[in-house]
Image (spheres, grey):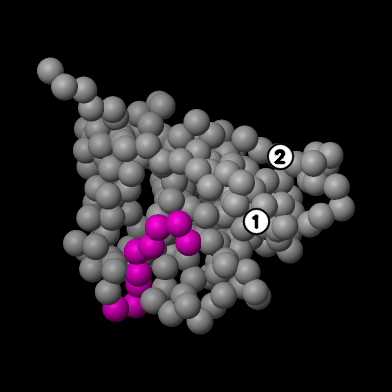
Amino acid sequence: MPVTSGDPRHGERPLTMWVRHLEERCPEYRWEIVNGGIVASPQRDGPHARTLTRIMRRFIAAGLDDGETGVLQGVGLSLPTGAEDFAVPDLAVVNADIDEHRAGRSKSYDPACFRLVLEVTAENRGADLGAKVAAYAGAKVPVYVIVDREHQRLHVLTDPVGNEYASHRFHSPGQQVTLPGSIGSKVTLDVAEILRAGRWRTSG
């Protein structure tokens, strides 16, 4: 649900003020400013949250939440595309000293602290597969992983160059994906297991 800065609802107020207002009025959404426009992500459903839990387990088991790195959900990443721009990835592997790298007075952090960002698609999957690819690449985040629940595949994007990633690989159920060692440890994801966690469960 993108809202651009040209929307008459913005008037003369800066985008950051609008985001704060929207957070108070519509707390069920996650609000971000990407490429100068406000992006709303719906509240996570059960399968979305379960997918993150499965992946977090793999990261923590690999030791990524100790020592030089941490595994965090919902932490803001300052974007270079605008003074107010920031994104809030579903999950991130960050440097352990991230608390020392706040971006000004905002709640976001220097993108140099992020080794990996991960998004699990929801109704606004277009942002995850479009605007956020350019945003994260432009911020030089080394690894961007997308769990595409609709098309049942895992995207792994690496090697940011300009506003895109030089490598964009798709992985289907039945494949095992080993993430780049630059995140701090060896992590292999079972694509079928991750995608299965993102489906609705029914009884009977």
Is 72 included in the stretch rendered in magenta? yes
Horizontal arrangement in the rendering, residue 187 relative to residue 164 (left or right): left
| Residue 148 visible at all | yes
| Residue 162 visible at all | no
Horizontal arrangement in the rendering, residue 147 relative to residue 36 (left or right): left
Percent of width and height locating residue 9? 79, 41
- Disc 1 marks which residue? 20
Q: Residue at x 29, y 29 (%)?
A: 199
Q: Element under label 1?
A: helix
Answer above or below: position of 96 versus 84: below
Q: Residue at x 23, y 68 (%)?
A: 63
Percent of width and height locating residue 94? 42, 68
Q: Earlier in the sequence, mark 2 or mark 1?
A: 2
Percent of width and height locating residue 2? 66, 38
Decide: marks 2, 1 in contact (CB < 8 A)? no
Q: Residues within 10 Å of mark 1 (few under 14, many from 20)?
A: few
Range drawn in magenta: 67-75
Q: Nearer the viewer, residue 7 or 78?
A: 7
Is 90 included in the stretch rendered in magenta? no
